[in-house]
Image: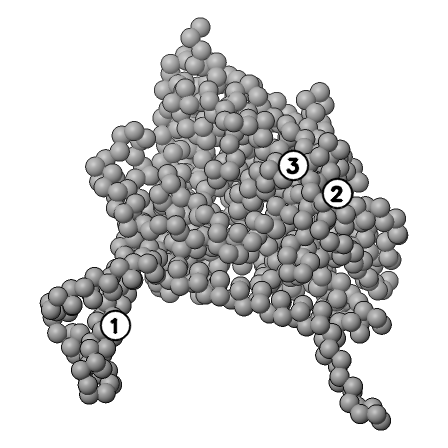
Amino acid sequence: MAEAHSAVAFSFTVTPDGYDVRINHEALKAVWESGVVSWKKRIGKLKNNIHNGVFPASLYSWLIVVTIVLAVQLVSYDPSFGFIQLIHLHIPYVNSASSSLLGLYISTIVFGTLIWIAKFLVLKYLLKLLLSYHKWIYEVHGRTSFTTKLWFTLIKLYGGRKPLLMSYQASIPKLPVPDLRSSVNNYLNSVQHLMPAEKYKEVETLADDFCKGVGKKFQRYLILKSWWATNYVSDWWEEYIYLRGRSPIMINSNYYGLDALLVHNTSVQAARAANLIYAMLMYRREVDREELRPILINNVVPLCSAQYERQFNTTRIPGIETDKLVHFKESNHITVYHKGRYFKVLIKHKQRFLKPAELEIIFQKILDDNSAPMEGEEHLAALTAGERIPWAKARQEYFNHGKNKTSLDAIEKAAFCVTFDTEPQEYDPKDPSKLDRYGKAMIHGKGYDRWFDKSFTFVVCSNGQIGFNAEHSWADAPILSQMCEVTFRHDFDLGYDEKGHCLGTPECEPPHPIRLHWEIPTPCIDVIESSFQVATKLMNDLDLHIMMFTEFGKGFVKTCKVSPDAFIQAALQLTYYRMENKFCLTYESSMTRLFREGRTETVRSCTAEVCNFALALNEGKPKSECIKLLNKAAETHQKLYRDTMTGRGVDRHLFCLYVVSKYLDIESPFLSKALSEPWKLSTSQTPHQQTDRLDLNKYPDRICGGGGFGPVTDDGYGVSYIIAGEDTIFFHISCKVSCPHTDSHKFGATLKKSLCDMREMFSKN
């Protein structure tokens, strides 16, 4: 009870002897400090909103405009052509010379302010028009047209200075709805070489009927939505592709990321966790304060920053028909899982963030705690790994009151979740299988030791190596990839002592970790174990192979004058053909963040041109012919990639047309056919060096291992790759054990040979 009494700042009681008033000054001080922090945040948010509202102008420019207008007015010249006098007539003042002069000054300031408002509105609209120009992306580097040079100059002139994270949001254009016939024709071009002539003729007829018939109606509804909504794709994509899915999100939807593999800062688990978690919290503060610099292509063209908002304090809540994403404005704790137990860890002390040395003490207490898990607690997170409907029902029935609700709230309202694994993970060039185990530990773990609904679970292995598992609906991989770049750099800057512990000394007695308590009845335990069985089946069916390719990297590819991404995509097509003796529909993810709230689009990278190249190389055609075909395939690929980036993609348009058809309850044979075709090869490139905080030229050993995802189809492959440096590429290859035709290790070996064969094309021998 002592803690409860000390928590009361003010108490007032009436006794037989009179009044008894007690004031706890420490508690009052804490209340006061909390209020001060809260108001500072509000003022900071208001300041940022004003800054972003007038951007690309600035508040300083208001002073300049008003000063100029006043100066002109004072030399007896009316810059307003009588408008200042009109304002002056409507300002009440005492009829005296001094009051009249003051009124004139006020009128001039009001007029100057109106001029300034008009100025920043014109600048904002002008910037939006400039950002709608996309021809620059199609031009060859070094051969920029005069129009594009002028455009770059205007962007730099009108683009504003010192932008905050969200400063450009109001000026980023909306995603346009592509022309219906163009999208359909592009779809037909992407499948013609992959279908028998008779089947293609049938699809072509369906497409023609669609364009002449119901397609026009669907298109009109979509255009109407594009006028009204910020982005005509993103809300439907989030809802129907992610949140309405009722199957497990572990492996099927969530993705993972790895550590920097060639450097090992410390083997002390608690210390590595403390430094990186502190770095993540500092990164979160940068995002909250909008101090994080927005990503600018060529240091000029801004990308949409909307996805950063839900990176922290966010969780996915299961529902019977659809899930929902819940984002909390603030969270002052994280949750930690270790050996089947959950702990709540406060991250602040007296309104400041705990230092790494203080966090290390807390984490070491958790690692040293040998208490047993409560009944049902150890496998609890398997609920988030299994089917969504059983989890939704269990949550409603067993976690909506009492201890269970309190503990579940602690997890769901946490800034993020942390798992301390009991096994080490590492990259060992002498044993490549260790890297495979590392990836499997991050994508699914044991099936019950990651909270798969959380925006991300930060995983710390027993030897200090780290990784993460991320829920996909709130944002795409480049957002977390950027956080990793920043936090890894911060980790190096923070450093460790000679024994591997965090530098610095604790400035306070850090708060004890709070053990979460549960009362899980037997029926709920049955649901947990059932979900765990589902998760176990998924884990056992995953075939994952991570290959560190070091024969060459983007340095060599650049000498071939071929886009590194196009080069790798060509190698993937060659590999698939060598594996299956045929080509398949291929998905490559591209971003659409040149538009407001843009997320991804599909590059249909298995083009007729790349198929011709793969066939020629596989058949041993002359090197010169193969190089010529590769260059042609690369040009086609780059054009497709640029089309998707600039809103001319196929698949999101067709998807939205399909959603409209369902709302209108009108069946479309063409859309059903087009959207039912499986992606047997699903690929994605993880971006590297998105910021200037990761200098690989100076520190080449700090390359990140990238991350990956599960296969999209039962008989296909999921391939993620990261061009990690001048001479290294990581490939994350996944498929299903249950499919007799797929093998991730065989695919990796064949891919390695394909890449080396492509390098051989450019040899002079």
Which residue matches tag 3? 495
- Find numbered disc 2 in the image and state the secondary structure of the residue it sits on: helix
Residue that lies at the very extreme toward the top in this rendered image: 765
* Among numbered discs 2 and 3, the one appearing first in the sequence: 2
- Separation of disc 1 and disc 2 at Cα? 59 Å
Q: Quadrant of the C terminus?
A: top left
- Separation of disc 1 and disc 3 at Cα? 54 Å
- Find numbered disc 1 in the image and state the secondary structure of the residue it sits on: helix
Q: Closer to us: mark 1 or mark 2?
A: 1
- Separation of disc 2 and disc 3 at Cα? 14 Å
Q: 607 and 499: which one is in front?
A: 499
Q: Closer to us: mark 2 or mark 3?
A: 3
Badge count: 3
**Could you tell me if residue 594 is visible in this image?**
no
Image coordinates for residue 611, horizontal then vertical, percent: 44, 27
The residue drawn where x is 27% and y is 30% is 143
The residue drawn where x is 44% and y is 63% is 47
**Could you tell me if residue 281 is visible in this image?**
yes
Q: Identity of the amino acid at label 1?
A: Val
Which residue matches tag 1? 110
In the image, 762: left or right of 755? left
Image coordinates for residue 698, horizontal then vertical, percent: 52, 27
Which residue matches tag 2? 270
Q: Identity of the amino acid at label 3?
A: Gly
- Find numbered disc 3 in the image and state the secondary structure of the residue it sits on: loop
In the image, 627: left or right of 7? left
Image coordinates for residue 333, horizontal then vertical, percent: 68, 58
